[in-house]
Amino acid sequence: MSNDIEVFKSKVDDIASVEMLEKAQNDCVETCFDRYETLKNQCKFGKDGVCCRICYMGPCRITPKSPRGICGADADTIAARNFLREVSGGTSAHSDHGRHVALLLKEIAEGAETGYEVKDEQAVWDTAKLYGMETEGKDFKQVLSELADIFIGDFTSQTETIKTVGLAPQAQRSTWEKLGILPQGIDRMVVEAMHRTHMGVDHDYRNLIMHAFRQSIANGWGGSRIASLASDILFGTPHAIRSEVNLGILEEKNVNIIVHGHEPTLSDMIAIAAKQPDIIEYAKAAGAEGVTLGGICCTANEVLMRHGVPIAGNFLQQELAIVTGAVEMMIVDVQCVMPSLPMVAEHYHTKIVSTVDMAKTIGAEAFDFDEENALESAKDLVKKAIDNFKNRDKSAVQIPEEKQTVIAGFSVREIKYMLGGRFRGSFRPLNDAIIAGRIKGAVGIVGCNNPKFKTDAYCNALVKELIKENVLVVETGCNAISSGKNGKMTPETALEYAGPGLKEVCEAVGIPPVLHMGSCVDNTRILETCTEIVNEGGLGDSIAGLPAVGVCPELMSEKAVSISSYFVASGVDVFIGHPFHITGSENVMNFLTKETKEMFNASMHFVEDPIEAAKQIIAVLDEKREKLGINKKQERKLVDQKDRREVSV
Ligand code: NFS
Ligand code: SF4
């Protein structure tokens, strides 16, 4: 048995998950970690991106002996087409999420019975100003309606560049214009990608990948940005909030409900419903002490940011949460939901409930969420979970103790307030700290878990190295949850790891050195932060010149491919823990890792070791600082020589 524990410890970086892997084994429950072992010898053609099944003459696989498919397509064309389709998948997922929130906003503006109302009126006026809308003499509903039209128009525009791209700095927009990749309507960009990758259309790998960038801009400076903006209006702009993370948030004496997926529309209502006095009474009548709501994946991040709902875990903990035997109901919406959940749930009493029409899981119960009576509908669902409490097998319950405190809620508005105060909110103190060298730069660590790697390990090792080197870290998605679990998101615990300059700034402002900025669509908050830094002045006029880097340690989803692409197109170098499915084409590899540098002043870097990645990231930050003329000698003295030796081991 102790041998097994060592095996589990080699798979995941947190104790709670180790404990649940052991329990899963004892309970004879199969998880993705087991299936990964079975499927380990993965198809090399797929991995290298040189399997094409775009037409029915194929599938064709490229080898040295057969360098072309039946139609004559070579490895470059095939890998580039596959890459573009991945970016389409990611762009679609994020953008469709944005569309749903934008459509709800429009309904509210038109006075429809939705059960929702605008939580953050100020955000409506601020956003209208961002888009340069004329608001004088108009009432709130009219402004909201016009704003919703702008959002929706960005999906449908045929020939006009999308309006949200106008929120990017001028330097980025000029670059995109020069390269001919300013995006038109988000829907059109995806349709065009599917057209271009149909058999016999676009065969030039460079041309294909440039469309991948164009489409990714329609995501980062379009669909995703709209998702964040519209969600802030509807559900409130996040502000700093304390909560907890990891499986230990589940409570043995309570009814435990988990929300999982991505869209906040239902989960935000569930968060409100679970606190209602009549619901708590109902839970007590069922023999529980109360109701505990927890989240998994980005739905978790959304309700953490706005309600302080604790997080049960990230992507690879979705099955393990059920293995605790203490979850009455897991409510899922869209994206990153494993179809295996009902199979895991069969071993316990957990009900899996799917709530979105277009996302059904075999074996899950479908719940028809009534948006018009949103709160009542959410309460009905919570009651169903409470009714399931009596079916819990007490002997099957084992909840890990492990949980950590997190401070989350760092929207751009909140960072501004924290830096400059409520009435003088400004990025000036941050820019000054970067210029003076107290902060070397900023690194955004984003994205998924992937059973190919030890869960959370890359992120945890990298964060430690970076904050020691006075790099401010901002995070979203499942990696934000990794750092939360690892105790890096409280000022108290994390600051002992920070270098002296970063520590000084964090202490003065009262923030952790690792900031939780939200879900994966909220990566646009990172772009917004970069834009604010540029606009504040003193660090050049382009995001591409800033000492800023993006990292995606455990790339799993197509969304992460799209995100990496829009970061590079925006001038931010991106480090990825393992290569995309493009390694079968030297030209495509070369294009993404080198040639893009000339176009965007940024490129993709595939670095499998986090310590090596830290070194290379610091080198990129130093290079950008050098170009800005702020890499002065005295700044180096702020870093302890002993620390410096340690990082270069
Ligand atoms: Ni992002 Fe969020 Fe997690 Fe990856 Fe999935 S939950 S949208 S895709 S796995 S970070
Ligand atoms: Fe094969 Fe060409 Fe058809 Fe692809 S498009 S499956 S390479 S024949």
Image (spheres, helix red, strand yellow):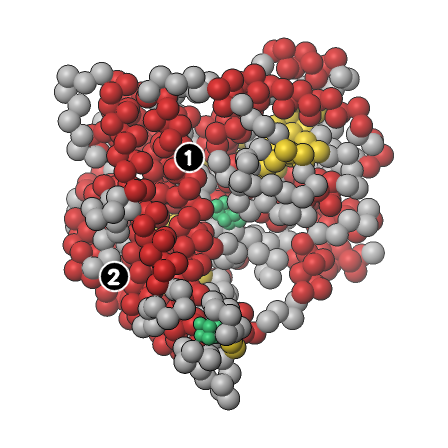
Task: Assign a secondary structure to mark 1.
Answer: helix
- Considering depth in this image, is 150 or 510 the residue closer to the camera? 150
Residue 230 or residue 577, whichever sits in front? 230
Q: Quadrant of the N terminus?
A: bottom right
Left or right of 300? Residue 364 is right
**Three-letter code for the amino acid on which mark 1 is drawn:** His
- Mark 2 to mark 1: distance in Å? 32 Å
Closest to the observer, 461 or 39: 39
Horizontal and vertical percent position of residue 211: 31, 60
Q: Nearer the viewer, mark 2 or mark 1?
A: 1
Q: Residue at x 49, y 65 (%)?
A: 578
**Quick one: which residue is furthest to the front in this view?**
56
Above or below, comparing residue 584 to residue 604 in the picture: below
Counting the numbered discs, the total is 2
Q: Which residue is mark 1?
A: 100
Q: Residue at x 39, y 18 (%)?
A: 112
Which picture quadrant has residue 286?
Answer: top right
Q: Residue at x 40, y 50 (%)?
A: 91
Q: Which residue is mark 2?
A: 600
Amino acid type shown at disc 2: Phe
Q: Position of residue 424 (x, y in %)?
A: 23, 27
Q: Position of residue 598 (x, y in %)?
A: 23, 68
For ligand 1, tell me if the residue under mark 1 lies within 8 Å.
no
* Residue located at (51% from left, 88% from top): 65
Residue 556 shown left or right of residue 10 in the figure: left
